[in-house]
Image: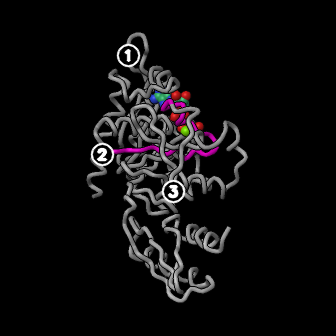
């Protein structure tokens, strides 16, 4: 590895992979920095850090940094919950598919590094993403949604041994992939409030968060924990979704409420959050999800709550621009 390669790596780490390979000629070092999506403060801090690092390189007298804004700003929506198994992944996959059906240019990242489920939900198991310019190229999943998951990057079971920094790095690679054709990135968060979640809210700054809960009281207490994680990081709440709310009988279509009704809606009111959707517990949703045919892509009753949810999220997005 040459000195320039080493410098190049250091600059890439400093800048989140936003710099071109530096060139040194007659004492002048030139490089391009992609400043798209950065605030003025972030930009000047990054320029200063790059300049300082470049000046340490032997033979460098001047440093010229050409600032470009080619990086396309993507709006990140995090789908989270305090508790596992409440349906985050199901909601994320179907929200992405439904947004795509509504004409939103949307992609999906599965941030559940230790238990990825999106390759199964969107029928892209066993696929491996290619890379270009050190960036991953997303895979096209069911419903035409471009996606990346740890399940595409590691062999089954391998990711389990990864420690915090490696997991955060894998997340960064997926978020900073070549998402050239999309405006919105739905991120399926792992359960709870650990390292990956912190890295997500602090480093990748979602534009908003959706919290998924089930009607049980316990899950709602956990939802509050997830809400706090985002609020402390200044991430706006899009709202709360009640999943597995009411049971749709597969024989007669009648709806019953084994866990009680309206709990999440009133909890949302208490927490001051918009209530976004009520998604019933439906065998059809589970079997279609397991088969990699997202219900939101279909035309039966199971698609309806996801399409309504996507319309609400799309309206929220338009208020953000
Ligand atoms: N509305 C629903 N109706 C029926 N089954 C559902 C519904 N939502 C989710 N499920 C099922 O519940 C299980 C858990 O859902 P899912 O994997 O989406 O939850 P999760 O919150 O992402 O879990 P984890 O915390 O493990 O990541 C899955 O088998 C899924 O098919
Ligand atoms: Mg999940």
Q: Is residue 291 above or below residue 69?
A: above
User: Which SS class for mark 1?
Assistant: loop
Mark positioned earlier in the residue sequence (2 or 3): 3
Front-most of residues 75 and 276: 75
Residue 314: assigned label = 2
Residue 133: assigned label = 3
Q: Quadrant of the N terminus?
A: bottom right
Tell me if residue 49 can be seen: no
Span highlighted in magenta in the image: 105-123
Front-most of residues 48 and 321: 48
| Residue bearing the label numbered 1 | 254
Q: Is residue 74 above or below residue 287?
A: below
Q: Indicate the quadrant where residue 278 lies.
A: top left
Q: Position of residue 27 (x, y in %)?
A: 54, 86
| Label 3–label 1 contact, CB within 8 A | no
Q: Position of residue 296 (x, y in %)?
A: 38, 30
| Label 2–label 3 contact, CB within 8 A | no
Q: Quadrant of ligand 2?
A: top right
Left or right position of 213 against 321: right
Left or right position of 177 against 255: right
Q: Position of residue 211 (x, y in %)?
A: 45, 46
Say which residue appears at 52% left-offset and 62% top-offset: 203
């Amino acid at each position: 590895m040459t000195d320039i390669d080493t410098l190049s790596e250091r600059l890439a780490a400093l800048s989140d992979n936003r710099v071109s390979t530096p060139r040194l000629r007659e004492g002048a070092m030139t490089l391009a920095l992609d400043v798209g999506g950065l605030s003025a403060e972030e930009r000047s801090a990054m320029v200063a850090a790059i300049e300082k690092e470049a000046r340490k390189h032997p033979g460098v007298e001047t440093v010229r940094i050409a600032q470009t804004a080619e990086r396309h700003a993507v709006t990140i929506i995090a789908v989270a919950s305090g508790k596992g198994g409440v349906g985050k992944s199901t909601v994320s996959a179907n929200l992405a598919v439904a947004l795509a059906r509504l004409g939103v240019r949307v992609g999906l990242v599965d941030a559940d590094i230790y238990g990825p489920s999106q390759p199964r939900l969107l029928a892209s198991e066993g696929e491996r993403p290619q890379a270009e310019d050190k960036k991953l190229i997303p895979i096209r999943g069911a419903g035409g949604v471009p996606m990346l998951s740890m399940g595409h990057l590691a062999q089954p079971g391998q990711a389990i041994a990864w420690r915090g920094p490696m997991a955060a790095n894998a997340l960064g690679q997926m978020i900073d992939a070549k998402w050239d054709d999309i405006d919105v990135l739905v991120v399926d968060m792992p359960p709870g409030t650990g390292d990956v979640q912190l890295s997500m809210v602090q480093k990748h700054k979602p534009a908003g968060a959706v919290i998924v809960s089930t009607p049980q009281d316990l899950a709602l207490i956990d939802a509050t924990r997830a809400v706090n994680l985002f609020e402390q990081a200044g991430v706006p709440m899009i709202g709360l979704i009640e999943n597995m709310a009411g049971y749709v009988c597969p024989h007669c279509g009648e709806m019953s409420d084994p866990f009680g009704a309206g709990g999440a809606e009133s909890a949302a009111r208490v927490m001051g959050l918009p209530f976004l959707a009520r998604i019933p517990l439906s065998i059809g949703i589970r079997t279609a999800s397991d088969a990699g045919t997202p219900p939101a892509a279909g035309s039966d009753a199971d698609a309806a709550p996801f399409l309504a949810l996507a319309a609400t999220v799309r309206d929220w997005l338009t208020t953000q621009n």
